[in-house]
Amino acid sequence: MSGETATELVLIRHAPALTGARLCGRTDVKADLGDTARIAAVRVLAGLPVRLIVSPAQRCQHTAQALWPDREGALDADLWEQDFGAWEGRPYADLPDLGPLPPVDLAHHRPPMGESFADLAARVWPALNVIADGGNATIVAHAGTIRAALSLALDSLVSGLAFEIAPLSVTRIARLTDGAGWVVRGVNGQP
């Protein structure tokens, strides 16, 4: 891969979400932006965006504004977090334990009236390809969105589920311009 050109996507998970210990995928909650030193360090780690693309969730928009107050990010609704349907807003303690499911079953498990990780990936993958068509970009989004991006880069739906994505972490993937696919350049980078 040495010397090959690529389009890089820098993916940043939003700052810690103020969920009140409840599951919030599509539930629009604010982010805790109090750790200004960490935000400044993530800004340096991520670098200045060539283009800035942001999930419409307020936690993502506010994180992007905190990272680059002088930049306006383009909103992309396809980058929203997974819709957990009837599970949205429920305390974590009240959710079913899906840990025993094999990875392929977990990827296709759909909460009532929600979407599965496979559904999320089917929404996110085309959006990432369109973004990459426009050149290098920085994306502020969600853990599920970043896991879907990793699944795309690894060419394996279930592989993305193996990653824990920390708030205010930086993940880098790149699409090779010679048509050889995607590569992972770094996951969960933190200052």
Image (tube, helix red, strand yellow):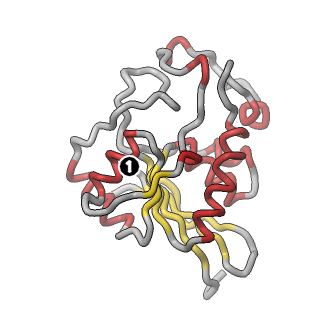
Find residue 96 and report its horizontal and vertical position in percent: 62, 16
On screen, residue 119 versus residue 12, left or right, reads right
Q: Residue at x 39, y 26 (%)?
A: 19
In percent of width and height, residue 163 lies at 58, 45
Dividing the picture into quadrants, the one containing residue 167 is top left
Tell me the amino acid under the disc marked 1.
Leu
Binning the other alpha carbons within 10 Å of mark 1 as few (below 14), some (14 to 19) or many (20 upward) gives many
Location of the N terminus by quadrant is bottom right
Q: Out of 7 and 160, give the one closest to the viewer.
A: 7
100 up-or-down from 162: above or below? above
Residue located farthest toward the top when viewing the structure as drawn: 94
149 over 22 or under it: above or below? below
Q: Residue furthest bottom?
A: 3
Q: Nearer the viewer, residue 100 or 185?
A: 185
Looking at the image, residue 137 sits to the left or right of residue 87; the answer is: left
Q: Report the quarter where the C terminus lies.
A: bottom left
Using residue 157 as the reference point, say whether residue 53 is left or right of it.
Answer: left
Image quadrant in which you'd find residue 70: bottom left
As helix, strand or loop, the secondary structure at mark 1 comes to loop
Towards the viewer: 158 or 146: 146
Using residue 95 as the reference point, say whether residue 116 is left or right of it.
Answer: right
Residue pictured at 31% horizontal, 62% vertical: 71
- Residue drawn at 41 percent across, 21 percent down: 21
Residue in the picture at 34% in, 34% down: 30
| Residue with the mark numbered 1 | 168
The mark tally for this picture is 1
Residue 161 screen position, x and y as percent: 65, 42
Please state the horizontal and vertical placement of residue 146, each as a whole percent of the image: 56, 50
Q: Is residue 133 above or below residue 105?
A: below
